[in-house]
Amino acid sequence: MAVITTTFSSTSGAAWASSTWASGDPSWKLDVQLTNWVNAINDASKISIIATPGSATARGSGDLVQWLLRCRESDTSSDYGLNFCGANASGSAMPYNPCGAYYGRTAGSANNGYGNYGGLITMSAGATPISTSDRAADYRTAYDAEGATPWFAFMSNMFSGSNSGTLHFLCRLSLSNMASGSYYPSSGLGKWIYATVGNTSYTTVALPQFVTPQRNILAPYIGVGSYRTLRAPQPPDGRGDGYFFKLGAQYGDSHFLGEPTYDMLVSSGQTGTWGDTVILESKTYTRAVGCLWVRIA
């Protein structure tokens, strides 16, 4: 399957998710692509959308809207998954970072209609500064739903005229190189990583924080006990520009999680600006944020 991409934009002052949640909202446009991707995977045992910004009880200033992606690998004893791309419905910056993973969820009216959580794994504040209320923004999505390692990327340039922005990246990890007989949980862990990063500096070598969907975070952890930093080369800014690296194998608090594919790469420090492209081994990548490049063809 070819990589599917789309681009769209919002004007300064636009709501991220308006009170009526209309087709012109940036979050609506993202929802169309995210839904297409999940539908193309067509396997609810791996991933399904159980709530969207349209599920929120309220969509005003200060109201959190998000997607809940259930990722429980046919484990029906608990509801766990990912809190994807949480943001203030009005488009103003949130005072905290609502992105991460949830577990032990029960449906209900709590948390603006998203239900009660047994627990949350949240990434640090400022990792994903979605903000549309005071600036124009450009967006791009890219995804591949085929095969054993589907992935989805949402990229944004929230600071019009600069080279900073945000990235949300979902990737099903490959286990093909796992040694025979090595430890890996057979249940209670979704085989995904959700990585997010946001930066406001052209020269920042930004690396994402990530979480894994899991039934709980009691020791010994089957995923990650809290958010982690994605393991990747960190070439120095301004030296050796023009080199690209694959993300390496990722590890949780106690064991191997899996390997990301070649669909997100790390470049040396100041390679490219937002939206630039490069072709490597017949694959086309675009600069998403910092030193991170996402495949678009």
Image (cartoon, rainbow, N blue to C red):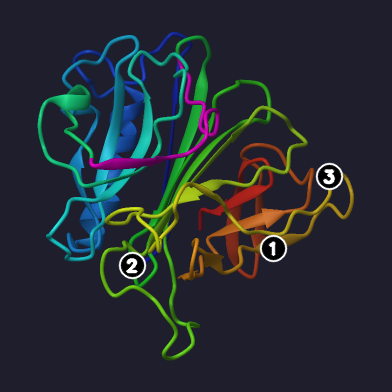
Q: Position of residue 261 (x, y in %)?
A: 51, 67
Name the disc covering residue 237, or none: 3
Magenta range: 118-132
Tell which residue pokes out farthest to the bottom in this image: 180
Q: Position of residue 67 (x, y in %)?
A: 28, 37
Viewer-nearest residue: 272 or 262: 262
- Mark 1 surroundings within 10 Å by alpha-carbon count, few (fewer than 14), some (14 through 19), many (20 or more): some
Residue shown at 59% from the left, 54% from the top? 285
Viewer-nearest residue: 45 or 186: 186
Mark 1 or 2: the one toward you: 1
Residue shown at 46% from the left, 47% from the top? 226
- Three-letter code, disc 1: Phe
Q: Position of residue 283 (x, y in %)?
A: 58, 64
Residue 22, above or below 168: above
Q: Is residue 127 magenta?
A: yes
Viewer-nearest residue: 39 or 190: 190
- Three-letter code, disc 2: Glu
Asked where in the image residue 110 lies, by quadrant, the reply is top left
Verify CB contact (< 8 Å) between mark 3 and mark 2. Answer: no
Q: Position of residue 284 (x, y in %)?
A: 59, 58
Name the disc covering residue 194, or none: none
Verify CB contact (< 8 Å) between mark 1 and mark 2. Answer: no
Callout 1: SS = strand
Q: Which residue is mark 2?
A: 146
Magenta span: chief secondary structure: loop
Residue shown at 63% from the left, 48% from the top? 292
Residue 170, above or below 126: below
Name the disc covering residue 245, or none: 1
Mark 3 or 2: the one toward you: 3
